[in-house]
Amino acid sequence: MRIEDYALIGDMHTAALVGRDGSVDWLCLPRFDSGACFAALLGGPKAGRWLLAPAHGRPSTGRRYRDGTLVLETEWDAPEGCVRVLDFMPPRGEAPDVVRIVEGVRGRVEMRMEMVLRFDYGNVAPWVRGEDGELAAVAGPNATWLRAPVTLRHERRPHRTTASFAVSAGERVPFVLTWRESWLGRPDPADPMDSLAGAGRMWKEWLGRCTYEGEYEEAVRSSLLTLKALTYAPTGGLVAAATTSLPEQLGGPRNWDYRYSWLRDATFTLQALMRAGYDEEATAWRDWLLRTVAGDPADLQIMYTIEGARRIPEWTVGWLPGYEGSRPVRVGNAASRQFQLDVYGEVIDCLHLAREEGLGADEQAWDVQCALMEYLEGAWKEPDNGLWEMRGPRRDFTHSKILAWVAADRMVSAVERQGMDGPVARWRALREEIHHDVCTRGYDPGRTTFTQYYGSKGLDAALLLIPRLGFLPIDDPRVSGTVDAVRRELMEDGFVLRYRQKADDVDGLPGGEGTFVACSFWLADALALLGRTQESRRLFERLLSLRNDVGLLSEEYDVTARRQIGNVPQAYSHVSIVNTAAALARGGDARTPRARRHPADGAAVTGGKGGR
């Protein structure tokens, strides 16, 4: 099944992927980063799934989310009758529940249900027994209970639960799967119909707070629901995606675990939430960030768990064959221990934005910014692994140096415009030094473009962010030159690659990858800032067309296979939809601060209130 064949349901603690065929092929319990009990996504039906569909086996004829909710409706319309399955996860109470309700719409339809529970990413088959009219399953720390008003049959070999039943027009047959730690015992069962009403009400009330109006409103609202579903409610942390190891190249090894929170997403996520009126969620994200980065600035990581923990050891799941044979399947992420210079600028920029937009005073935020800046003053010249988590040798990546400039610039701005206290003269001098260094060593005057790293001939799509970050004014020829160079050298079929894999082994990995969705949105932003609004709109609308039928986008797009690839749904892609739509609605202004030319060599410094 293609990646775009999946829809998302969730309860803001975890999420499940439901295929067009009515099969739940991915679910981790009780959290996003827990072991999967349904892992057919990466290992086929034997690795765990929950199928609920008509017995005739024909494909579904339509699906959608109920208006303003994350309640999924999948419909099968056949000559003998029409049936609908509602899938959702109620707001988390005592324990997580997955509720599936079969509704008869027309005629009479024979249905089949098959549940294959496999804890620990398809590795552990539980012991199953009948208990009080339901089936209870237990394996080590995991226990589940399955309830339904039909006869449930469990087969010890091949360890699966099945049911056959018929549904007529007007009838409803609910199934409820509940998980809990095995030593705590059975929780109170969720009432399926009450849960349906509660879930619908919760999602509608949340989306009702959205203040975004204007062009592309449907796309923005859909993406905001997705971002909310990817948020871990207890802490406010946002996972990069709901999955692990969906490949960046079909059949290749570029398969990573994205069920963690990345600092690089901080500023753009905050912008998206605030632009839509979700200050409460933006504050929760800011507070998660402050708690997470507390400590020695030298120990700052690029990603953390959704709780803010630091250890994310990476290991391979050898018994899973991977999505369409894409090995290895990885759990954890070794890139968490990389040194990435840009995250210091990302965090400082995010905290600066929060203060500038009146998100709520937090004295700790300025202390954290000052501590990070003090460390950065001595570390910015060091080579790093770069924004894209290169597993090759460390280099002087141009984007990383620009984010070091962003850090100094925002600290200067905080003193000058926000009344904060700090060594502003020293920070101004540092800002000038970094700017001169980047413009001298990271720029190729012969090609009129900035380069991926100092001394390189290669390009990097992250350079499209230069005007948005305020590093140079939009009318500087180095900006348009870089945008044109990226379009010339990094585009495939109208979409943008992060960079080219070349002989310099910049990322230390074999094979290639698809075009990167967020980078293509960055190009749309840059075009809008350059006044090329029609080009920007055409690209933006083409990107929107890549979404699946329920509005979801993955990390990348394979222009040859014409399909989504990479982990799904990707928060970075959906944040980009919100921000680019908002920028186009404001006449193309996607910038973080405004920039003005430095009188000496064209260097830019911020001035005036930022156009965030």
Image: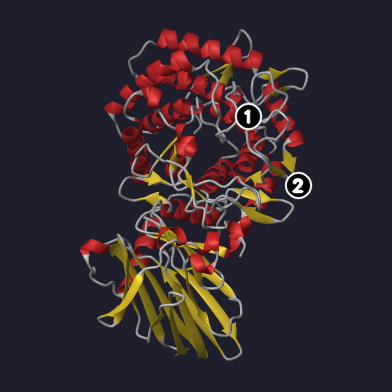
Residue 233 is situated, as x and y percent measured from the top left of the image, at: 33, 51
Q: Please, is residue 560 above or below residue 73 in the view? A: above
- Dividing the picture into quarters, in which one does residue 198 lie? bottom left
Q: Please, is residue 32 above or below residue 503 in the view? A: below
| Foreground residue among 608 and 58 | 58
Asked if residue 463 lies left or right of residue 90, the reply is right
User: What residue is drawn where x is 25% and y is 81%?
Assistant: 132
Residue position marked by numbered label 2 in the rendering: 493
Residue 161 is situated, as x and y percent measured from the top left of the image, at: 42, 78
First along the sequence among labels 1 and 2: 1
* Secondary structure type for disc 2: loop
State how far apart marks 1 and 2 are (Cα): 20 Å
Q: Residues within 10 Å of mark 1 (few under 14, many from 20)?
A: many
Residue position marked by numbered label 1 in the rendering: 463
Residue 152 is situated, as x and y percent measured from the top left of the image, at: 38, 83
- Dividing the picture into quarters, in which one does residue 306 lie? top left
Asked if residue 76 lies left or right of residue 312, the reply is right
- Tell me which amino acid carries mark 1: Leu
Q: Please, is residue 155 above or below residue 9 in the view? A: below
Q: Quadrant of the N terminus?
A: bottom right
| Foreground residue among 555 and 75 | 555
Q: Residues within 10 Å of mark 2 (few under 14, many from 20)?
A: few
Q: How is the image coloured?
A: secondary structure
The answer to whether any part of residue 111 appears in the image is yes
Residue 602 is situated, as x and y percent measured from the top left of the image, at: 63, 14
